[in-house]
Image (cartoon, grey):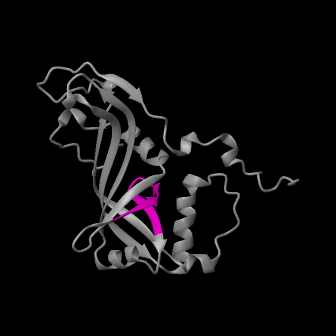
Amino acid sequence: MTPDYLDSEMRRADLAWTDWPAIEAFLRDELICRVAVNDVPFPYVVPQSFTFVGDAFLIHCSRFGRFSRLLRENPHVTIVVDRPVALLKAPKGQNTSLEYYSVIARCEAMTREQTHDVIAHQNEALEKFRPEKDYTPIEPGAANQIVAIRCRIESLSAKKRILADGQYSPPGQPQAPYLRYPFERGAAVSGLPEDAFDPQRFRRKQF
């Protein structure tokens, strides 16, 4: 079911990505987001590994750095996740472009520092990266070094430009005769080999 926070209004209506199952699959597959938090005079932006859980992004950081300090001062953050797909070229210079997927989420960050809360948060986040659950429990000493951050989504917009979907030049302009040059696929959970999720890997005898 499409969540209420999905905002499909944008200037380029032809680029609006509204297929929620596809957006959700994209967010569950991607590995890195960029998180912008308020700072003066410039926003502070950090790359983060993340886990998307339907209504929020789960991230974490050190308790002792700039990022956690800024979050305590202002919990409003913007999260960006994107994937370039192909380079597009046509005879006219203005028709050099990209195929891409892109998601922007505006969130309120809720932080937790109690040991049991951090461990529960990290166990939930690990579902994305270690669904085989072959790891030993998270140690309290490690949990006490980090802040668990649940970025609750207030609004989210998504864009894509994929030629196969008929998205070419801006509305009202002739379709450009693009040549398409795909990029190699970037890092994603689905790109890992099957043995990355083998629950027996650490139980086999090592030689």
Picture quadrant of residue 205 = bottom right
Q: Residue at x 11, y 25 (%)?
A: 172
Q: Position of residue 28 (x, y in %)?
A: 47, 47
Which residue is painted at 29% across and 79% down in the image?
73
Q: Residue at x 23, y 22 (%)?
A: 91
In the shown orientation, is residue 88 left or right of residue 63? Answer: left
Would residue 117 be counted in the magenta stretch? no
Q: Is residue 43 visible?
A: yes
Q: Is residue 2 something that shows in the picture?
A: no
- Position of residue 70 relative to residue 90, above or below, is below
Q: Position of residue 165 (x, y in %)?
A: 31, 25
Q: Nearer the viewer, residue 140 or 21?
A: 140
Q: Is residue 83 above or below residue 123?
A: above
Outermost residue to the left: 172
Magenta segment main secondary structure: strand
The answer to whether residue 187 is left or right of residue 136 is left
In x, y percent, where is residue 186?
49, 41
Q: In which quadrant will I find the N terminus?
A: top left
Residue 27 location (% of width, % of height): 42, 47
Residue 22 falls in image quadrant: top left
User: Is 59 in the magenta?
Assistant: yes
- Considering depth in this image, is 163 or 115 the residue closer to the camera? 163
Residue at the (18%, 43%) spot, across then down: 9
- Classify 33 as above or below 72: above
- Tell me where the magenta segment starts and ends, as one range: 45-60
Q: How many marks?
A: 0
